[in-house]
Amino acid sequence: MTIHQPPLAPAIDPVLLDRLAETAIRVGLNLQPGQDLFLTAPMAALPLVRRIAEHAYKAGAGLVTPFFSDEEITLARYRYAADASFDRAPGWLYQGVAKAFSENTARLAVVGDNPMLLAQEDPAKVGRASKANSQAYQPALEKIAGFDINWNILAYPSASWAKQVFPGEPEEIAVARLAQAIFAASRVDLDDPVAAWAAHNTGLRSRTGWLNQQRFHALHFSGPGTSLTVGLADGHEWQGGASTARNGVTCNPNIPTEEVFTTPHARRVDGHVRSTKPLSHQGSLIDGISVRFEGGRIVEAHAGRGEAVLHKVLETDEGARRLGEVALVPHSSPISKSGLLFFNTLFDENAACHIALGQCYSKCFVDGASLSPEQLAAQGGNTSLIHIDWMIGSEEIDIDGVHEDGRRVPVFRKGEWA
C-alpha cells in the first residue's frame, strides 16, 4: 500500500521541520513511554503533525489522537449558520478531552491559522462563539491552568498566516521567511536544539531564582501612556522555561519562550497602561489598547482598532476584567530583535513584557498544586473563562520591584534587565 505524503511547500526545509517535531516531543512535552497524546492543529499543518506523530511513537507514545481545524469550514459557519449556532460549542468533546487529561494524556497544540480570518465577520458573533467555546472548554482548561499534565504549543508556517506577516511578498517567499523565523525562534536551526533549550532554560531559571528571592509585593511599570502598579499574589512564585507538571513530567509548555512570569493579585492592580503591540484575538486585531485599573478591575477600556471586540472580551465574566498573569521579557529578546509582528500571541508575547486578562496559573504559587481553588482566590488568584495576553513592554518601559515597606529595586530600565 502506498501512503501519500501531504505536499510540503518548497520553502519549508524538511530537515528543520522534522527537527521541530522532535523538539516538540523531547523538549516541549518530554512525552513519556506509554503516555497518550491529544493533538490539535490546522489542516495546513498536516506535514508537521505527521512528523510529530512519528516522533511520538518513537518515544513510546501509547496513542496519538489528532483533531484538525479548517479555515473554510470556520468561515462557512459565520456565513451560513443559524444565529443560535453562535451560542453553542461541542461540550461533549471537551468533556472527553478533560477525561483524557485526567487519565494523564499529554496535550499538544499546533498553531498556524490565518490570524485575521474573522476580521470581516460580525464582532458580536465572534464574541458569542468565543464565550460559548470558553464555557464548554472549562473542564479541560482547568487541567491546563492547573498544570496537571505536560503540555506544549508550537507553530507551523501556513501560507495564510505567512501572507499576513509578509503582505508584500509572493506566497512562496512569505512562507520561507515565516518558516525561517519560526525555526530560529524555536532554536531548531541550531545543531543541537535539545542542548540549546537546556542552556536557555538555565538562563531563565536564574532570572526566576532572583525574583523569587526578592519576594516583591508589587511591580510598577512606567513609560509613555503607562503608570501601572501590579500587586503580586500572596505566596506567588515566578516561573519560566521548563516546569514540572503535577504528573511529575518536566516540560516546556511554549516553544518559543523568552518570558518569566507569575500571578498578580487580582484585587491589587491600579493605574493606567497602554499596549505596545497589536493583539490578534479570535481572528480580529485589537490595537492601541488603553485601560485603567482600580482595585484590580478594569474600569475604563479603549482601543484604536477593535474596541468592540475588546469590550466583548471584558464582558466574558467578572474575572475577564482582572489579571491572571504578569510576564517580563527584555526588549532585546530574539523575537523582538527580529522586528516582526507575528499576529500570534505565542510569538508576540515573547517580544515584550505583557499582562494577561483572566485565569491565573496555580503553578505560579508556592505549593500551588496543594492549594484549593478557594485558597488560590484568597491569595489573590483570578478565575475566568479566558486567558488573553497583551503586550505592554518596549524599550521605553521601566519596571521597579516594590517591597512591602515601599522600598524599590530596579528590575527593568529602558526595556532591559537592570
Image: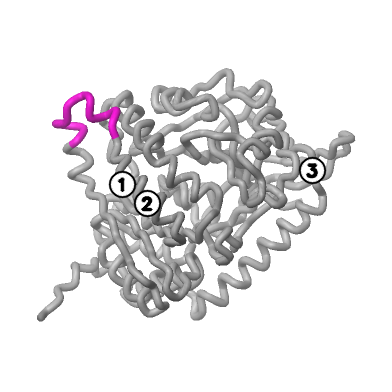
In the rendered structure, does residue 274 fall within the stretch colored magenta? no
Is most of the magenta stretch helix, strand or loop? helix
**Which residue is at the front of the view, 145 or 406?**
145
**Left or right: 45 in relation to 270:** left
Q: Quadrant of the N terminus?
A: bottom left
Q: Which mark is residue 97?
A: 2
| Disc 1 target residue | 93
Q: Which mark is residue 102?
A: none
Q: Which color scheme did the rendering employ for the protein? A: one colour
Residue found 44% across the figure and 67% down from its top: 24
Q: Which mark is residue 216?
A: 3
**Which residue is at the front of the view, 172 or 322?**
322
Q: Earlier in the sequence, mark 2 or mark 3?
A: 2
Q: Which residues are magenta?
A: 77-88
Are the residues tagged 1 and 2 within 8 Å (C-beta)? yes
**Left or right: 208 in relation to 27:** right
The residue lying furthest to the top in this view is 299
Q: Is residue 262 visible?
A: yes
